[in-house]
Image: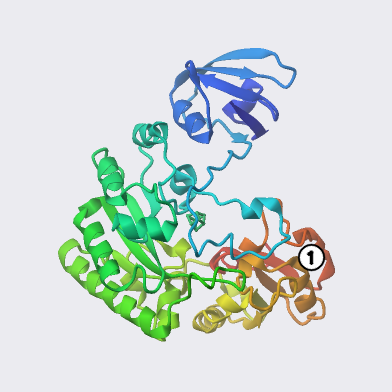
């Protein structure tokens, strides 16, 4: 059963009289488990929907869908699949105590992998999930491989029951499912020869594996430092070299680079970021792979309406982790917009300076950094610092923050989203 949270007007859902609180039970007799069932089973021109209205009355709808009319039904969020692993580097262990409970949920959900590009490990799939992935052709999926050697992968995931990933991928490949993959680097465990084997194994799977990224593990003060450490500059340099070698091979044989390093990999290694062409279609940009070049390219290609920013003062507020990437971006932004762009790197004054992620900055940190900055016209804040309800980690709302500071605020993932529509929109 799934429940309606809202219905967009002038859609089929509204025409049927569906409303918040309606429980959607089945389509053509098939029970509805989540948004995947809903979207795939209602994609037909005709179907029978069984629902229960908020009063408990069962209603059967014989639906004929006029061409092009969307259902317009928003569903309550699905119950997230819990992770079966206990990676030493898990971001949940890296969180300070005292945050909202939902932040401590270790999610590992193939459905969100398909829908949002979240990386999943596929270690918690039940036979029924495998059948759904095949039936609904959930492709491409984003998978954390880390190592293709099953023993080493089980050690990395701290999960003795983790299935062999190559066999899993091969099984799905027979049904046309493709994968973007990542390898989070834990020095001494999955770099060096282990990494070489992983890259070779994934490359051997041909077009089934669309890309692989190498990402250095990121830790906080609260991580399990007795078990895991971040790679050094030399270690990242060695990985970048290996990834670049595979990139050259793939480019020669397949016409695209296939293997990519995250921006962090090059920055920690002290190497220049590769040019934009190195990232092909920027398939893993959300994973921090080519994010800087992507933004620069968007600006250079004039895809954004940036001219209206000329002469304004823009503050870019971020945490210390992202702060080191910004010098590669902000001058480009300043040139493209004609704005005076100022970087404000702030320390987390709720959890301590060792918590460097922009996504963990509380609202109060932004408020303190911005309350006396009437000289700024607009400040861009990391969008990942607020949840779906617009709340920061310390339960200050975005609207409360807006009221407490003297400039316009915009939430942004990569600047282009916040600045691209111009001033005053
Ligand atoms: S797969 Fe590892 S890092 Fe991801 S949620 Fe599970 S334990 Fe944490």
Q: Quick check: 179 above or below 94?
A: above
Q: Quadrant of the N terminus?
A: top right
Q: Is residue 181 visible?
A: no
Nearest to the observer: residue 83 or residue 158: 158
Viewport quadrant of the C terminus: bottom right
Please report the residue visible at 71 percent of the width from the left and 54 percent of the height from the top: 100
Residue 202 picture quarter:
bottom left
Q: Position of residue 267 (x, y in %)?
A: 44, 81
Residue 104 locus on image (x, y percent) = 63, 54
Does 182 sit above or below residue 44? below
In the rendered image, is residue 359 in sight?
yes
Q: Is residue 407 above or below residue 271?
A: above
Few, some or many C-alpha atoms within 10 Å of disc 1 (few <14, some 14-19, many ≥20)? some
Q: Please count the marks in the image.
A: 1
Instruction: Say which of 168 and 373 sits in front.
Output: 168
Instruction: Residue under label 1, please give it.
Output: 401
Quarter of the view holding residue 8:
top right
Q: Is residue 197 left or right of residue 344?
A: left
């Amino acid at each position: 059963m799934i429940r309606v949270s809202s219905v967009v007007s002038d859609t089929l859902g509204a025409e049927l009289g569906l409303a918040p609180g309606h429980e959607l039970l089945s389509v053509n007799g098939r029970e509805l488990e989540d948004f995947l069932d809903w979207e795939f089973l209602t994609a037909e021109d005709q179907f029978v929907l069984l629902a229960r209205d908020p009063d408990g009355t069962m209603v059967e709808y014989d639906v004929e869908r006029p061409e092009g009319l969307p259902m317009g039904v928003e569903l309550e969020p699905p119950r997230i699949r819990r992770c079966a692993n206990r990676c030493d580097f898990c971001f949940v262990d890296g969180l300070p105590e005292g945050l909202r409970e939902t932040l401590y949920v270790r999610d590992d959900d193939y459905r969100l992998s398909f829908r949002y590009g979240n990386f999943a490990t596929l270690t918690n799939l039940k036979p029924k999930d495998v059948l759904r992935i095949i039936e609904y052709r959930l492709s491409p999926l984003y998978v954390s491989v880390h190592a293709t050697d099953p023993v080493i992968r089980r050690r990395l995931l701290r999960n003795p029951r983790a299935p062999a990933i190559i066999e899993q991928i091969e099984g799905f490949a027979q049904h046309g499912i493709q994968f973007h993959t990542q390898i989070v680097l834990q020095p001494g465990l999955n770099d060096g020869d282990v990494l070489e084997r992983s890259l070779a194994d994934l490359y051997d799977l041909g077009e089934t594996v669309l890309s692989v990224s190498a990402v250095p593990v990121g830790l906080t003060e609260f991580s399990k430092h007795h078990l895991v450490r971040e790679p050094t500059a030399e270690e990242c340099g060695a990985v970048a070299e290996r990834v670049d070698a595979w990139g050259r091979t793939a480019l020669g044989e397949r016409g695209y680079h296939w293997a990519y390093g995250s921006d962090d990999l090059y920055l920690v290694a002290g190497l220049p970021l590769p040019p934009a062409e190195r990232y092909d279609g920027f398939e893993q940009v959300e994973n921090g792979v080519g994010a800087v070049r992507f933004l620069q390219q968007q600006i250079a290609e004039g895809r954004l309406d940036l001219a209206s920013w000329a002469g304004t003062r823009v503050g870019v507020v971020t945490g210390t982790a992202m702060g080191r990437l910004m010098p590669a971006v902000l001058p480009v932004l300043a040139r493209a917009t004609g704005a005076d762009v100022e970087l404000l790197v702030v320390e987390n004054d709720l959890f301590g300076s060792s918590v460097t992620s922009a996504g963990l900055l509380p609202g109060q940190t932004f408020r303190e950094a911005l309350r006396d900055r009437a000289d700024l016209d607009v400040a861009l804040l990391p969008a990942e610092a607020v949840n779906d309800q617009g709340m920061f980690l310390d339960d200050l709302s975005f609207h409360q923050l807006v009221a407490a500071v003297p400039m316009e605020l915009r939430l942004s993932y990569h600047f282009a989203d916040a600045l691209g529509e111009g001033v005053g929109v």
